[in-house]
Image (cartoon, rainbow, N blue to C red):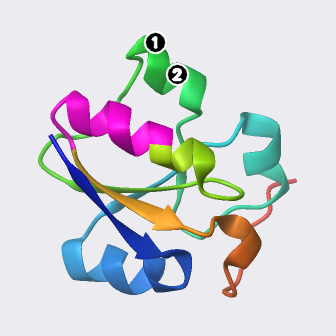
Amino acid sequence: MRFHNINIRCIMEEAMKYQAVIADVRDADKFRTSHIPMAVNLPLPMIRRGNINLPKNKVIIVYCDTGGASTMAAKLLSERGYHVINTVGGLNEYQGALTKQK
């Protein structure tokens, strides 16, 4: 399977366009500190183990801090039959609002 890349700045537009699931592939501590609104946390190690609880009939948009981990996650998810969009630039280049958990 294949995936394609978008700029992180387009993530919300693409999520709305496809009614996609946004998946933050960083670890849980970083996710709690800040994440893109509506994102679910799916750390890369869980994806590597195949511990994925996402619907295969939805587009999955993945992101991380810089783009490296999300590229690996996109590759792994696409190999498992998911339709994936990877974000280039990562959270470091995202300019929208972030959600923080207490």
Total tally of numbered discs in the picture: 2
* Residue 60 covered by magenta stretch: no
Q: Residues within 10 Å of mark 2 (few under 14, many from 20)?
A: some
Give coordinates of residue 29: x percent, y percent.
82, 39
Q: CA distance from mark 1 to mark 2?
A: 5 Å
- Seen from the viewer's position, the closer of residues 97 and 48 is 48
Q: Secondary structure at mark 2?
A: helix
**Placement of 65 over or under 26, stated as above or below:** below
Give coordinates of residue 46: x percent, y percent.
52, 21
Quarter of the image for the N terminus: give it: top left
- Seen from the viewer's position, the closer of residues 99 and 5 is 5
Q: Which residue is mark 2?
A: 46
**Placement of 85 over or under 95, stated as above or below:** above
Left or right: residue 1 compared with residue 29: left
Q: Which residue is mark 1?
A: 49
Left or right: residue 61 compared with residue 7: left
Bounds of the magenta span? 72-82
Residue lying at 60% horizontally and 56% vertically, measured from the top left: 67
Q: Quadrant of residue 47?
A: top left
What kind of residue is marked 2?
Met
Q: Quadrant of residue 13?
A: bottom left
Q: Quadrant of residue 56?
A: top left
1 and 2 marks in contact (CB < 8 Å): yes
Give coordinates of residue 60: x percent, y percent.
32, 54
Secondary structure that dominates the magenta span: helix
Q: Residues within 10 Å of mark 1 (few under 14, many from 20)?
A: few
